Amino acid sequence: MNHLGSLAVQGDDGAVDSLLREIWPMVFRYCRSRLARVSGLAHHSDDVTQEVCIALLTALPRYEDRGRPFISFVFGIAAHKVADTLRVAGRVELVPVDAMPERPDDGPGPEESAVRKSEAQRARELLDELPDRQRKLLVMRVLVGLTADETGHVLGMSAGAVRVAQHRAIARLRKVAVAKRFVP
C-alpha cells in the first residue's frame, strides 16, 4: 500500500486507479461501521466513502511521507469525513412532505432495520467490554479489514503481536458473550 501511495503521489494515473480500487472497500467498511452507530446514517456510507476518495485525490499532491503507513493518512481523511457527516446529521431536522418519492425505497424494511439495530447494539456492548487497545485492534482488523501489518503500524505493534492480541481479544469477547448470554 505504501509503494502504491508513493506512486500515486508522484502522479502515476495507473497507481491512482489501483489505489482507489484497493482502499474503497476498507474505507467503505470503516464509514459504514462508524455511521451505523447513529440511526438512519448507515445509508450515507457510500456517499461518505466517495467524499473520502475525492478528498484523497485532492490531497495527494500535498502528501508528505512522515514515516507512517499511507493507509493511516487515508483513514485520517475518512475520520474527518465521518465526523463532518455526523455533525451535519445532528443539525438536520426531518420535515414531512406531501409528495411521494419518485422511486421505491430499496432499503431494509422496518423488521430488518430493527434486527440490524439490535445486533449492532449487542456488538457495541460486547466491544465496550474490551480494553480500548483491543477494541481498536478488532475494529481495524474485522470491520475495516486492515492487514495485521497495517494494523501493527497504526498501533505500534509487530504483525505477530497484532495476531496474538487479536486472538486474545476474540477469546475475551467469547467469554463475555457467554457470560451475557449472547451466545449459547
Image (tube, helix red, strand yellow):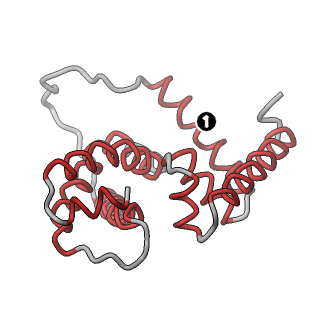
Label 1 sits on residue: 119
Camera-nearest residue between 2 and 97: 2
Identity of the residue drawn at 59% across and 71% down = 156
182 sits left or right of 16 in the view? right
Q: Is residue 23 above or below residue 136?
A: above
Identity of the residue drawn at 63% across and 49% down = 124
Residue 100 appears in which quarter of the rendering?
Answer: top left
Camera-nearest residue between 78 and 152: 152
- Bin the neighbour count of mark 1 within 10 Å (Cα to Cα): few under 14, some 14-19, many 20 and up: few
Q: Position of residue 166 (x, y in %)?
A: 70, 51
Indicate the quadrant containing the N terminus: top left, top right, bottom left or bottom right.
Answer: bottom left
Camera-nearest residue between 137 and 110: 137
Q: Is residue 46 above or below residue 116?
A: below
Q: Amino acid at mark 1?
A: Glu
Q: Position of residue 17 (x, y in %)?
A: 20, 46
161 sits left or right of 41 in the view? right
Camera-nearest residue between 51 and 151: 151
Secondary structure at badge 1 equals helix
Q: Position of residue 138 (x, y in %)?
A: 62, 52
Residue 175 appears in which quarter of the rendering?
Answer: top right
Indicate the quadrant containing the C terminus: top left, top right, bottom left or bottom right.
Answer: top right
Identity of the residue drawn at 64% across and 43% down = 123
Q: Position of residue 143 (x, y in %)?
A: 52, 45
18 sits left or right of 98 in the view? right
